[in-house]
Image (spheres, coloured by chain):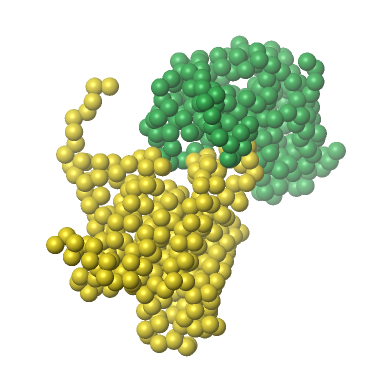
Amino acid sequence: MLYDLVLAPFADFGFMRRALVGVIALALGAGPIGIFLMLRRMSLMGDAMAHAILPGAAIGYLLGGLSLGFMTAGGLVAGFAVALLAGALARVTVLREDATLASFYLLSLAGGVVLLSVKGSNLDLLHVLFGSVLALDDATLVLLVSASSISLIVLALIFRPLVLECVDPVFLASVNGHGGRVHLMFLGLLTLNLVAGFHALGTLLAVGLMMLPAVAARFWCRGIGTLIVTATGIGMLSGLIGILLSYHSGLPTGPSIILTAGVFYAGSILFGPQGGLLLSLFPRSHLRG
Amino acid sequence: MGKTSIRFHDLTLGYDRHPAVHHLDGSIEQGSMTAIVGPNGGGKSTLLKAIAGALTPLDGRIETHQRLAWLPQSADIDRSFPITVFDLVAMGLIPSRGLLGRIGRKDSAAIEHALDAVGLNGFEDRIIGTLSGGQMQRILFARLLLQDAPILLLDEPLTALDSATATDLVALISQWHAQGRTILAVLHDMDLVARIFPHTLLLAREPIAWGKTSDVLTPAHLQAARQMVEAYDPFADYCARVA
């Protein structure tokens, strides 16, 4: 029974195994990045950048068709360009960064869909917007796994300055002049993970595997290390359960994964020991000291 | 003694071309302990910021001959970030260990020792969001201890602290002075300045008086300082006093 439900789909079908490897790789990179986005109050920035990838991927598509290389390169360039441009505009104009990002992402979404419609069919558009977890080929899998490996290695290297840049940027600048560079590297990793996520989950949902586990984890623990581990775990579980859900029920896979993460999120809001709703409804009596 | 630690050359500091500190000349000796006092808006924090290198002078320049540590006013710390006291204090090791250096057993012991020195033994694993304002300030002093810098710039280090905390931190400052470090502190408590600080710079956009504390803190000087902080003039002319 449990075998039929959980193991058989993976034992029987190669595309299920690929999907599982893909989402686990995605969750590994997205977990820590989501936590940093949340702690830096950049949750919406991730969303905006995910949309910004669309026109880049669309131009790649116009040039090379549904080609992994072209669409990845286009997405990377567009995502990083928008992040830099939004940051720069926020510095030189009166608009704050969030307003600039909101404008950018609306324009990117509209522009991307228009670009795709020039050459593509509706099927291609759906593929780009919502991804195709169940159709990951070898090359795409290698891309996903490389992206998460690079992310983890770079994050390990810049972990201290990144944390310091969040907590006390003035101090970092006063002892070490590399604060700005750390932020740029983080934006680069964010783009890389979003582009990887876009192949599996599409531009619209790629950021879901980043933000939902991160926000859910906040209700369970406090330290940055445990937050990252918890978020990654929730991301992996959401991937596994989402794929199975989609397999057994015939629902679209990407949305199933994100909805599963949503269930974790809702459960965490309710039952989480760190500020969850139930605890605040039934507060335990205070301690003696 | 007698060697210069920091020297100002016709220094003018400000924001958006409007000066906050005007034509400051002079030097600070190694191992000296100087209080910077003056009215709000007199340029005290701006001066420390510039010495720390976080603000480019409009005119003139600053020479510093030693490594320095800077504690900004109400440090710009994200208190909601889930980091432990231990990790925050450990950041004081960055100047000596670098951003990637390993924190070994000796360093851990140094961190424990610094926490002991500020009276927060046992707080290592607390998340900084759970600390009070006074405890936070003690933590930042512990971090300063680890930075182990020969020059210390302290911007209103005692503001909004209870007397017990203030007394402890003043004792630390005196101890640093006794170790031969150069100390520059922005303060508002004139009694404390008179009691502890040998030298004082009275700053109200321009240096009103600078020297031995007893010579600086005279009623006439303080009165002059109060009058010097003119209102911000959006149509200010070019400054004619070019050296």
Q: Nearer the viewer, residue B31 or A38?
A: A38
Q: Is residue A238 left or right of residue B133?
A: left
**Image quadrant for the N terminus of chain B?**
top right
Furthest residue to the right? B243
**Image quadrant for the C terminus of chain B?**
top right
Residue B220: which quarter of the image?
A: top right
Q: Colour of chain A?
A: yellow
Furthest residue to the front? A11
Q: Nearer the viewer, residue B225 or A85?
A: A85
Q: Is residue B45 above or below residue A107?
A: above
Q: Which residue corresponds to the image point at 69% horizontal and 16% vertical from the top-left? A: B180
Which chain is the one coloured green?
B
Picture coordinates of residue A141, whole percent (x, y): 43, 67
Q: Which residue corresponds to the image point at 74% horizontal and 18% vertical from the top-left? A: B211
Picture coordinates of residue A76, whole percent (x, y): 53, 68
Q: Is residue B127 visible?
A: yes
Q: Which residue corresponds to the image point at 40% horizontal and 30% vertical from the top-left? A: B125
Residue A275: which quarter of the image?
A: top left
- The mark total stands at 0
Q: Is residue B201 above or below residue A242?
A: above
Q: Nearer the viewer, residue B58 or A21?
A: A21
Picture coordinates of residue A213, whole percent (x, y): 33, 54
Picture coordinates of residue A227, whole percent (x, y): 37, 45
Q: Is residue A232 left or right of residue B57?
A: left
Q: Is residue B134 above or below residue A157?
A: above
Q: Is residue A202 left or right of residue A246?
A: right
Furthest residue to the left? A1
Q: Which residue corresponds to the image point at 51% horizontal and 71% vertical from the top-left? A: A72
